[in-house]
Amino acid sequence: MYVILRPSRSYGPIQNAIAVLNLLSLLVGMILLCVGTFVYFAPGAVFVTSTLLPHLILVLGATISLVSFLGYYGAMNEKRWILWIHVLTLLIAIALQITVGAIAFVYRDHGNEVLDNAWERVYKTDPRVIQDLESFFQCCGFEHVFDRPVPVTCAIDHHFMVGCRESIQTAFQDSLQAIGVIGAILGGIELVSLLGATVLFHRFDKQKYRRECEAGEADLVQAFLEAQHIDRQIEEARRQRERQLGYESLADQVRAKSLARAHEEGLFGPRDPPAYGTF
């Protein structure tokens, strides 16, 4: 008797770990979307917008959210093609992170120049943004209260006696540091997730091969059992035929003895044999 037992999945812990990592990555992606939206619409967004950082943060957050969902769904449902998309999108997300990190690193020491150029550009195109900045940071002008304030009487009207450069630069550097920390954490999660996805690919292949072997073994056992059943039927038919032939032979012997006895007793003539089954 054959008993086929399907072995338990050996990649269960890895599968669960990848699912948890992708959920954490999805949370980080949602946080990046919120941060990117806030930075884009915040009063100081114009200075960051000039370096395309909020756009990259939004794209990165959306990409991370998508790749995390694909990784979670593909890992829990064993979908190889979804895991392939997960890996490719993960590589794109890592490339975007490297781009954002490179931009943040480049502008780390050029923040004053970037902010000054942004202030000059907005001062000429949309002075209301500068008014929002001055109101938000409680300052007037850029370097000092007479450096391109909006309006010119800002210091007199609002009694702000300091320029906005230091406040804006501090906020800008804090944003870059926050992006760097989030990027480092997210990069570690993504690398572990990428490694886990690679391991899952290998385990899925082994599991697929094992299932195919089990299916082939099950088919072989089923064919063997069917062959045994057919052999039993043939053997039973042969035995029934032998019993039938034995009964017929016994009946012929009994008939022959009965006829011989009847002739001995003179019950029938030599030319009048009785009908079959009579005595």
Image (cartoon, rainbow, N blue to C red):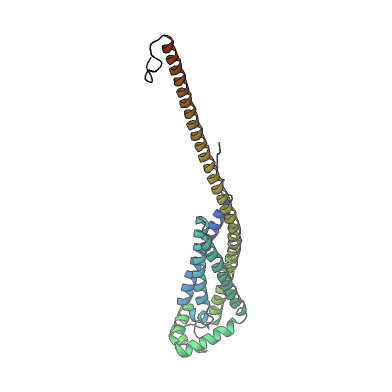
Rendered position, 233 above or below 170: above
The residue lying furthest to the top in this view is 265
Q: Residue at x 55, y 50 (%)?
A: 211
In the drawing, does residue 39 fall left or right of residue 271?
right
Rendered position, 185 above or below 39: above
Front-most of residues 190 and 205: 205
Q: Residue at x 46, y 73 (%)?
A: 37
Front-most of residues 1 and 87: 1
Image quarter hosting the C terminus: top left
Q: Position of residue 81 (x, y in %)?
A: 52, 63
Based on the displayed image, in which of its 4 quarters is residue 173 positioned?
Answer: bottom right
Kindly tell me whether residue 138 is visible in this rendering.
no
Kindly tell me whether residue 80 is visible in this rendering.
yes
Based on the displayed image, in which of its 4 quarters is residue 183 positioned?
Answer: bottom right
Image quarter hosting the N terminus: top right
Front-most of residues 37 and 193: 193
Front-most of residues 202 and 161: 202
Q: Residue at x 50, y 77 (%)?
A: 55
Count of labels shown? 0
